Structure formats: structure tokens, C-alpha cells
Image (spheres, rainbow, N blue to C red):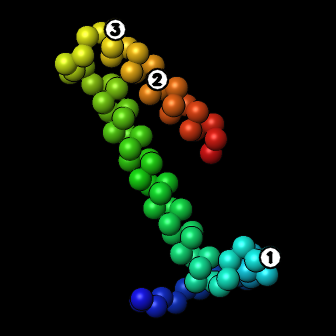
Amino acid sequence: MQSMNISLPESLKQFVDGQIAQGRYSSTSESMRELIRSDEKLKAEEQLEAKLLEGINSHESELDSTEWGSIRKEALALLKSRKTRR
């Protein structure tokens, strides 16, 4: 595993130390890894969302208009519910 040094303002260091003291993480490294994984997941979800919207807004499809309308409605509802949870 590679090592990386980071600098944090005192307030952020205190926050991380507090998370460790509360038992949420066992180390600073574990805390940072979790933050990076969360950011990776968020970026992947944003890319998927963008591709879904691109597909929804595209007029090329082998589906008939009724099928496409139903799929489009479901996808938009799903995207809307995800945005309200953030």
C-alpha cells in the first residue's frame, strides 16, 4: 500500500480525531480511505445519471412511444428521488 501525507486545518484534524475517538474509524487512514471511496461512488453515480439523462433526452430508440414514455417516467422519478435524498 502506498503512503501519502496530507495537511489539514486544525478544525478538520479535530473533526477526524473526534470520529476516531467516537469509534467510527480506527485510524486517520481508515477515515481518509472511506472519504475517498464515498467520493468515488458519488462521481460514478453522477456519471451514470448524466448518461441516463442523455439517453432519456435522445430521440433514437427501437421502443415504441408508449414503452419509451413509461421507461422515461420511471427513470425521471428515480433520479428525482435520489436528488432529494442527498
Q: Residues within 10 Å of mark 3 (few under 14, many from 20)?
A: few
Q: Quadrant of residue 21?
A: bottom right
Q: Which mark is residue 22?
A: 1
> Residue, x 53% and y 62% (percent of image)?
38
Residue at the spot x=47%, y=57% of the render?
41
Q: Secondary structure at mark 3?
A: helix
Q: Are marks 1 and 2 in contact (CB under 8 Å)?
A: no
Task: Please say if 55 is above or below 49.
Answer: above
Above-or-below relation of 40 to 27: above
51 or 23: nearer the viewer: 23
Circle nearer the N terminus (2, 3): 3
Viewer-nearest residue: 61 or 8: 61
Q: Sequence-wise, which precedes: disc 1 or disc 3?
A: 1
Q: CA distance from mark 1 to mark 3?
A: 53 Å
Marker count (numbered): 3
Which of disc 2 and disc 1 is earlier in sequence? 1
**For residue 65, side relative to residue 78 (left or right):** left
Judging by the rendered image, the residue that carries numbered circle 3 is 66
The answer to which image quadrant residue 40 occupies is bottom left
Query: Label 3 near label 1: C-beta < 8 Å?
Result: no
**Amino acid type of the residue tagged 3 in the rendering:** Thr
Q: Assign a secondary structure to mark 1.
A: loop
User: Mark 2 = which residue?
Assistant: 74
Q: Are marks 2 and 3 in contact (CB under 8 Å)?
A: no
Q: What amino acid type should be assigned to the residue bearing mark 2?
A: Glu
Q: Quadrant of the C terminus?
A: top right
Distance Cα–Cα, label 1 vs label 2: 41 Å
The image position of residue 13, as x and y in percent, is 71, 82
